[in-house]
Amino acid sequence: MTRQEINKLVINTLKETFDLSAEDLVPNAKLFQDLDLDSLDAIDLAVKLKNDTGITLDEGEMRSIIELSDLVDLLERKSNISSNDND
């Protein structure tokens, strides 16, 4: 997956799952402060993203995410690792 595809997927997932507006979903939006997500929302988000991408985000990784861009970075990194494993 490209970074652009990952970003689009994350934004669409957040919009649909948590009824957020596209205007709020900017790269530097803080998931817990700006978007008002809580720890249960983070679990829901991780499950939904795993279903959509096949990439597992563990609890420690989810705790390290502050901004929307952090989530995209993490998914991009893990996507590249898993695609390299398949080579």
Image (spheres, rainbow, N blue to C red):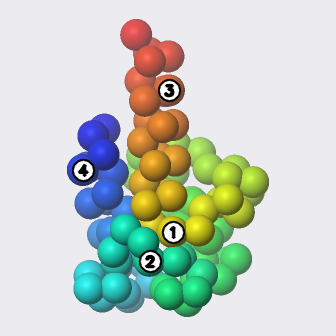
In three-dimensional space, the C-alpha distance between marks 4 and 2, rounded to whole angstroms, equals 17 Å
Residue found 24% across the figure and 50% down from its top: 4
Residue found 48% across the figure and 37% down from its top: 77
Mark closest to the chain's N terminus, 3 or 4: 4
68, 49: nearer the viewer: 68
Mark closest to the chain's N terminus, 1 or 3: 1
Residue found 75% across the figure and 54% down from its top: 60
Given the image, on which type of amino acid does mark 4 rest?
Gln
Residue receiving disc 1: 67
Residue receiving disc 2: 29
In three-dimensional space, the C-alpha distance between marks 1 and 3, rounded to whole angstroms, equals 22 Å
Q: Looking at the image, is mark 4 or mark 2 nearer the viewer?
A: 2
Residue found 59% across the figure and 45% down from its top: 56
Mark closest to the chain's N terminus, 4 or 2: 4
Mark closest to the chain's N terminus, 1 or 4: 4
Snapshot quadrant of residue 2: top left
